[in-house]
Image (spheres, rainbow, N blue to C red):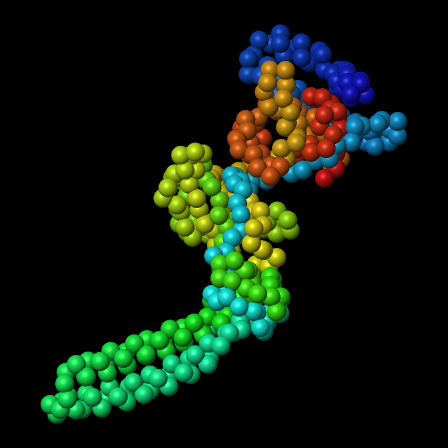
Amino acid sequence: MKNTSFLLIILLVLSSCGNDASVEKVIQSGDASEIRAKKEELSSRQRELSSQIADLNAALQQMDVTNDFTLVSTEVVEDTIFKHFVEIPGDVETDQNIIIYPEYSGVLREVLVNEGEDVQKGQILARIDEGGLRSQLAQAQAQATLAKTTFERQERLWKQKIGSEIQFLEAKTNYEALQNSVDQLLSQLAKTVVRAPFSGTIDEILTDQGEVVAPGQSRLFRLINLSNMHITAAIPEPYLGKIQKGSEVLVEIGATGKEFTSTIQQVGNFINPNNRTFEIKVNVPAGVNQVKPNQIATVKLNDYSSKNAVVIPENVVQQNSLGENVAFVVEPRNDSIGIVQRRPIKTGYSYNGKVEVLEGIKPGELIIVEGARSVRDGQEVKFQD
């Protein structure tokens, strides 16, 4: 800067030599138009000299190896789409995640599947020892067959007005009672076979073959279907008007860091009076891997969007003694040297390390992203992208 001032003084002195008389003569003429013309001529020469001085100063700076400028990193500010999200914790769930219990007491005679095996709805998973039910069924079926024959014969005779009504009714009642016994035994026998209630994967076998099992007590298998999972989250009441079925959301799975886009498939109609929240369900799209029931998820709701927004890194924003937000930009002198300018700025929403600038910085300017805390307003710096 001292070199620049010195060169400016020299050039102005040299350029003014031999011109003082001319200026005095113009002033003495008293002609306003001539005076204005002379002023414009000198102003034009001054601008030309200033440009030449800037070129000379840049050349001197490049030749001066002792000049040690502060090095800063810069980034061109561009207008872009800015979106702000509210992050709500949620849980991955599936409606088809159950423990299968036996419906019949007895010894677990056969386990017909392995852990991790895919099964279809209705497939036989295990058999429980029926404890003589088949023999009882065979005997009941034989008695029911005889009772049916007797009933049909009595029915024919009754239609021919032969025999008494009481004989006909006794035969009918006996047949129906024995048939009911057969049906009950068939139902009990069916309970000795454990079947898959829906298609899925045998995640865990909880009882070994040969153990005695009982209804409602012995856990046999865990069956899971991962093809229809969802995420539940409790949303604060103030966001009720901003959320509806079909709204797009971002979901992040904490354990894996995986993020995907989904939609809200259900919005609860009940506000929990304890925490003033309502529940939503977010669908897990097909093809999204490494998502398991009971994982912790983060549901990100887009509550603000702005097109053509000026966005800068949040960490470059500083506060002055008056509590105002400020940032530092570089006004380039050439391809690598510039002057620092401190800009008071007005900021809006911030998200994911970025903040929207509402006033103070325009697209195309160079914002200092590294080294901003070691510079001052008006300082010459060397910058790089």
- Which image quarter holds the C terminus? top right
In the image, residue 156 sits, relative to residue 235, either above or below, namely below
Rendered image quadrant of residue 292:
bottom right
Rendered image quadrant of residue 58:
top right
* Residue reaching furthest to the right: 66
Residue located at (33% from left, 87% from top): 145
Q: Position of residue 61 (x, y in %)?
A: 82, 29
Q: Number of numbered discs present?
A: 0
Q: Is residue 147 left or right of residue 134?
A: left
Q: Position of residue 111 (x, y in %)?
A: 59, 71
Question: In this view of the protein, which residue sits in the foreground, 40 or 326?
Answer: 326
Q: Is residue 191 left or right of residue 115?
A: left
Question: In this view of the protein, which residue sits in the foreground, 209 or 212?
Answer: 212
Question: In this view of the protein, which residue sits in the foreground, 365 or 350?
Answer: 350
Residue located at (55% from left, 60% from top): 219
In the image, residue 112 sits, relative to residue 33, either above or below, namely below
Rendered image quadrant of residue 152:
bottom left
Q: Is residue 107 left or right of residue 122?
A: right
Residue 49 in view (yes/no): no
Q: Position of residue 249 (x, y in %)?
A: 49, 48
Question: In this view of the protein, which residue sits in the foreground, 111 or 143?
Answer: 143
Q: Is residue 22 left or right of residue 266?
A: right
Residue 137 in view (yes/no): yes
Residue located at (45% from left, 50% from top): 281
* Residue reaching furthest to the left: 161
Residue located at (66% from left, 34% from top): 366
* Residue reaching furthest to the top: 28
- Which image quarter holds the N terminus? top right
